[in-house]
Image (cartoon, helix red, strand yellow):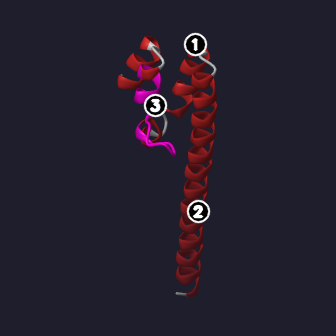
Amino acid sequence: AALEKKNARLEQEALKRQAEEEVYALQLQKERCFKARGDLMKEIDLAHEQEALVYLQEIRADPDMLVFRDRYGSTLLHEACSRGMKQLALAVLH
Protein backbone atom coordinates (compact mmCIF):
# COMPACT_ATOMS: atom_id res chain seq x y z
CA ALA A 1 0.00 0.00 0.00
CA ALA A 2 2.82 2.37 0.86
CA LEU A 3 4.53 1.56 -2.43
CA GLU A 4 1.31 2.26 -4.34
CA LYS A 5 0.97 5.64 -2.61
CA LYS A 6 4.57 6.48 -3.40
CA ASN A 7 4.14 5.50 -7.06
CA ALA A 8 0.91 7.50 -7.30
CA ARG A 9 2.64 10.54 -5.77
CA LEU A 10 5.59 10.21 -8.16
CA GLU A 11 3.21 9.92 -11.09
CA GLN A 12 1.33 13.04 -9.98
CA GLU A 13 4.59 14.94 -9.60
CA ALA A 14 5.68 13.86 -13.08
CA LEU A 15 2.34 14.96 -14.56
CA LYS A 16 2.63 18.30 -12.77
CA ARG A 17 6.17 18.83 -14.09
CA GLN A 18 5.05 17.93 -17.59
CA ALA A 19 2.15 20.41 -17.40
CA GLU A 20 4.49 23.14 -16.11
CA GLU A 21 6.93 22.45 -18.95
CA GLU A 22 4.12 22.67 -21.51
CA VAL A 23 2.94 25.99 -20.06
CA TYR A 24 6.50 27.31 -20.12
CA ALA A 25 6.96 26.19 -23.74
CA LEU A 26 3.74 27.95 -24.73
CA GLN A 27 4.90 31.12 -22.96
CA LEU A 28 8.21 31.02 -24.83
CA GLN A 29 6.42 30.49 -28.12
CA LYS A 30 4.10 33.43 -27.39
CA GLU A 31 7.10 35.65 -26.54
CA ARG A 32 8.91 34.65 -29.76
CA CYS A 33 5.78 35.35 -31.80
CA PHE A 34 5.28 38.73 -30.13
CA LYS A 35 8.90 39.69 -30.84
CA ALA A 36 8.61 38.46 -34.43
CA ARG A 37 5.47 40.56 -34.85
CA GLY A 38 7.37 43.61 -33.63
CA ASP A 39 10.16 42.86 -36.10
CA LEU A 40 7.56 42.33 -38.83
CA MET A 41 6.03 45.74 -38.14
CA LYS A 42 9.49 47.36 -38.30
CA GLU A 43 10.07 45.77 -41.71
CA ILE A 44 6.67 46.99 -42.89
CA ASP A 45 7.53 50.50 -41.69
CA LEU A 46 10.80 50.29 -43.62
CA ALA A 47 8.93 49.01 -46.71
CA HIS A 48 10.89 45.74 -46.71
CA GLU A 49 8.19 43.39 -47.91
CA GLN A 50 10.40 40.32 -48.41
CA GLU A 51 11.86 40.59 -44.90
CA ALA A 52 8.36 41.08 -43.51
CA LEU A 53 7.27 37.83 -45.18
CA VAL A 54 10.01 35.97 -43.28
CA TYR A 55 8.75 37.29 -39.93
CA LEU A 56 5.18 36.50 -40.92
CA GLN A 57 6.13 32.83 -41.18
CA GLU A 58 7.49 32.98 -37.63
CA ILE A 59 4.25 34.31 -36.15
CA ARG A 60 2.01 31.79 -37.90
CA ALA A 61 2.50 29.56 -34.84
CA ASP A 62 0.22 31.96 -32.97
CA PRO A 63 -2.88 32.87 -35.02
CA ASP A 64 -3.79 35.56 -32.47
CA MET A 65 -0.78 37.54 -33.67
CA LEU A 66 -2.23 37.67 -37.19
CA VAL A 67 -5.30 39.56 -35.99
CA PHE A 68 -3.65 41.43 -33.10
CA ARG A 69 -4.28 45.17 -33.22
CA ASP A 70 -1.47 47.61 -32.53
CA ARG A 71 -1.87 50.73 -30.40
CA TYR A 72 -3.53 52.49 -33.33
CA GLY A 73 -6.00 49.68 -33.95
CA SER A 74 -4.30 48.41 -37.10
CA THR A 75 -3.91 44.75 -38.01
CA LEU A 76 -1.19 43.23 -40.18
CA LEU A 77 -3.59 43.08 -43.10
CA HIS A 78 -4.39 46.79 -42.76
CA GLU A 79 -0.72 47.72 -42.56
CA ALA A 80 0.20 45.60 -45.59
CA CYS A 81 -2.68 46.97 -47.67
CA SER A 82 -2.09 50.59 -46.69
CA ARG A 83 1.52 50.31 -47.89
CA GLY A 84 0.72 48.48 -51.12
CA MET A 85 2.38 45.24 -50.04
CA LYS A 86 0.30 42.83 -52.07
CA GLN A 87 2.41 39.72 -51.37
CA LEU A 88 2.30 40.34 -47.64
CA ALA A 89 -1.44 41.02 -47.65
CA LEU A 90 -2.09 37.78 -49.54
CA ALA A 91 0.21 35.87 -47.18
CA VAL A 92 -1.68 37.20 -44.15
CA LEU A 93 -4.96 36.05 -45.68
CA HIS A 94 -3.67 32.53 -46.35
Which quarter of the figure is the C terminus placed in? top left
Q: Farthest residue in the left direction?
A: 93
| Secondary element type, mark 1 | helix
Residue 46 rendering spot, x and y as whole percentages: 64, 20
**Nearer to the camera, 86 or 66:** 86
Tell me whether circle 3 and circle 2 mark residues in contact (CB < 8 Å): no
Q: For the point 58% across and 62% down, which residue is it?
A: 20
Mark 1 Cα-neighbour bin, 10 Å: few <14, some 14–19, many ≥20: some
Residue at label 1?
A: 50
Q: Which residue is identified by label 2?
A: 20
Q: Give the range drawn in magenta.
A: 67-81
> Badge 3 local density, few (<14 within 10 Å), some, or many (20+)?
many
Residue 49 at x, y percent in the picture = 56, 15
Task: Check the image and report above or below for 49 versus 33.
Answer: above
| Foreground tag (3 vs 2) | 3
Question: Which residue in the structure is indicated by mark 3?
Answer: 76
Q: Position of residue 31 (x, y in %)?
A: 61, 46
